[in-house]
Image (cartoon, grey):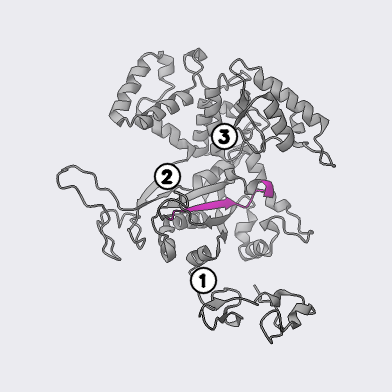
């Protein structure tokens, strides 16, 4: 089942019609997917729109694939029962020789690992020339655990699926760690001595195994007025905000002697460094991470930020950073929304996202490569205090810029020091004012025009109007520049556009 899959990339011909080669490939895929003993009347649709999140019968899946094509880099059909027989993880142990994942549950856990990498693809198809660092080795061990079976595969249960389902049971039924350890000890008794060595011994070991995915988060207490972040050792024992004096915790119930202190407000921070390292642990993604070097300078159209003047100026200003093409260029985006909808109560929640601009245009804006780094809870907008709440992210970005982190490049088979730089922020105009500190209200709110602005105050409403500020962008000989009637009365526009 590992024959040439290059036909997946040849979806349409020059006229925009589906190629015959692609149609035959789709028929082959559908026959393969529904030939599995566990397959029922429907399978997950791997088209670029559904992305294995929706189910369909053979006719629907075939139609979707011909219309939308396969999702990116889905050359190994792991969700539908195929494994890559990957020799790259043999330095840990022998990988499974079977060509298929035994059941839908195992495919689901294998898919969970692949999603954590940030891109569907194969892993290290060649033997490693340089030994991976400790963190990379731990992840490959976890990937190997997705293919190691318990009881010789008689129940089609892998080590990873067994641990994940046990942890899921703890979450669903709110079990304590001690209760979970007792259930784990009971389930271990039915395993052979060999299998007992494969599975974790307690809750701590199970969490340590899953934490290798790097999908953890930190919950940080915040002042109710967003003016202080209880972050770091110095603020660990504070019970009130040193800025406004507001209490850190909700009032205690005097009748409850052992009531745990409940913070009045918190934010959730998801570290970005492990997820950037994951991009280099997939051979396919690691290769794309240096795509920006191939961005053409000949075209007049900017199809990617790598072709912009800002990117080139940054490379000239920081040549040491630019010497390593694997260093990561990031963009930050944030905006507020009401999670309860327009009909709910007033609430403003602010997620903060980071985008990796090393990747080509068709990948850098995919949801897999837009990383959620922070959730700032409401009910009010943080306003100008958003810089206080962004401190954990700023500290991590400073560390990545100054010292970097050791990362294993699975495409080049070597370790290197990965650094990162934040080049852009993407937001609406009010969000721009919050992130930059620039006042976005009043006559001087435009950061380009500034004191040369043509904005004026309305005579009766007293509001600032930016009407007729756009004519300065027209060509010098455009007739609208000399129009005194339909724009600002009795004004001829002679000014050039403001410089960036």
Q: Which residue is mark 3?
A: 114
Q: Position of residue 443 (x, y in %)?
A: 54, 78
User: Is residue 1 among the parts visible in the rendering?
Assistant: no
Span shown in magenta:
348-362
* Residue 304 vertical position relative to residue 57 in the rendered view, above or below: below
Q: Which of label 2 and label 1 is nearer to you?
A: 1
Quarter of the figure that contains the N terminus: top right
Residue 358 drawn in magenta: yes
Q: Nearer the viewer, residue 135 or 485?
A: 485
Q: CA distance from mark 2 to mark 3?
A: 19 Å
**Residue to which mark 2 is pinned:** 217
Q: Nearer the viewer, mark 3 or mark 1?
A: 1
371 over 144 or under it: above or below: below
* Residue shown at 68% from the left, 29% from the top: 61
| Marked residue nearer the N-terminal end (3 or 1) | 3
Residue 251 coordinates in the image, percent (x, y) = 22, 52
Task: Point out the tag, 2 or 1, that comes first from the N-terminus.
Answer: 2
Q: Which residue is mark 1?
A: 440
Q: Locate the C terminus and report the quarter of the image it occupies.
A: bottom right
Label 2 or label 3, whichever comes before in sequence order:
3
């Amino acid at each position: 089942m590992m024959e040439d899959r290059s036909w997946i990339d040849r979806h349409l011909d020059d006229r925009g019609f589906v190629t015959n080669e692609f149609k035959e490939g789709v028929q082959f895929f559908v026959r393969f997917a529904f030939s599995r003993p566990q397959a029922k009347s429907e399978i997950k649709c791997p088209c670029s729109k559904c992305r294995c999140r929706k189910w369909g019968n053979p006719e629907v899946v075939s139609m979707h694939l011909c219309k939308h094509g396969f999702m990116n880099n889905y050359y190994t059909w792991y969700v539908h029962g195929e494994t890559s027989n990957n020799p790259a993880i043999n330095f840990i142990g022998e990988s499974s020789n079977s060509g298929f994942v035994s059941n839908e549950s195992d495919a689901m856990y294998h898919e969970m690992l692949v999603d954590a990498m940030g891109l569907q693809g194969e892993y290290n198809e060649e033997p490693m020339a340089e030994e991976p660092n400790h963190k990379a080795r731990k992840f490959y061990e976890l990937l190997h655990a997705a293919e190691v079976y318990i009881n010789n595969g008689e129940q089609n249960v892998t080590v990873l699926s067994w641990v994940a389902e046990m942890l899921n049971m703890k979450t669903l039924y709110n079990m304590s760690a001690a209760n979970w350890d007792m259930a784990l000890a009971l389930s271990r008794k039915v395993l052979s001595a060999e299998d007992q060595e494969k599975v974790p011994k307690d809750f701590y070991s199970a969490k340590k195994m899953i934490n290798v995915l790097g999908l953890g988060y930190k919950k940080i207490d915040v002042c109710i007025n967003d003016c202080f972040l209880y972050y770091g050792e110095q603020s660990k024992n504070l019970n009130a905000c040193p800025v406004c004096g507001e209490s850190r915790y909700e009032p205690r119930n005097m009748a409850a002697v052992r009531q745990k202190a409940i913070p009045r407000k918190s934010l959730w921070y998801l570290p970005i460094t492990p997820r950037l390292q994951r991009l280099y642990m997939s051979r396919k993604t690691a290769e794309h991470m240096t795509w920006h070097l191939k961005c053409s300078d000949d075209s007049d159209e900017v199809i990617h930020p790598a072709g912009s003047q800002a990117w080139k100026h940054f490379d000239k200003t920081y040549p040491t950073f630019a010497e390593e093409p694997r260093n990561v260029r990031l963009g930050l985006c944030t905006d507020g929304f009401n999670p309860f909808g327009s009909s709910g109560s007033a609430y403003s929640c602010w997620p903060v996202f980071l985008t990796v601009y090393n990747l080509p245009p068709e990948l850098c804006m995919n949801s897999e490569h837009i990383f959620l780094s922070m959730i700032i809870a409401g009910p009010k907008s943080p306003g100008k205090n958003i810089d206080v709440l962004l401190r954990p992210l700023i500290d991590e970005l400073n560390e990545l810029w100054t010292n970097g982190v050791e990362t294993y490049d699975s495409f080049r088979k070597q370790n290197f020091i990965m650094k990162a730089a934040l080049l852009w922020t993407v937001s609406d105009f009010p969000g721009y004012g919050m992130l930059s500190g620039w006042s976005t209200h009043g006559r001087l709110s435009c950061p380009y025009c500034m004191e040369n602005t043509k904005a004026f105050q309305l005579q009766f409403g007293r509001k600032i109007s930016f009407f007729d500020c756009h004519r300065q962008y027209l060509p010098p000989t455009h007739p609208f520049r000399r129009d005194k009637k339909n724009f600002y009365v009795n004004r001829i526009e002679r000014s050039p556009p403001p410089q960036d």
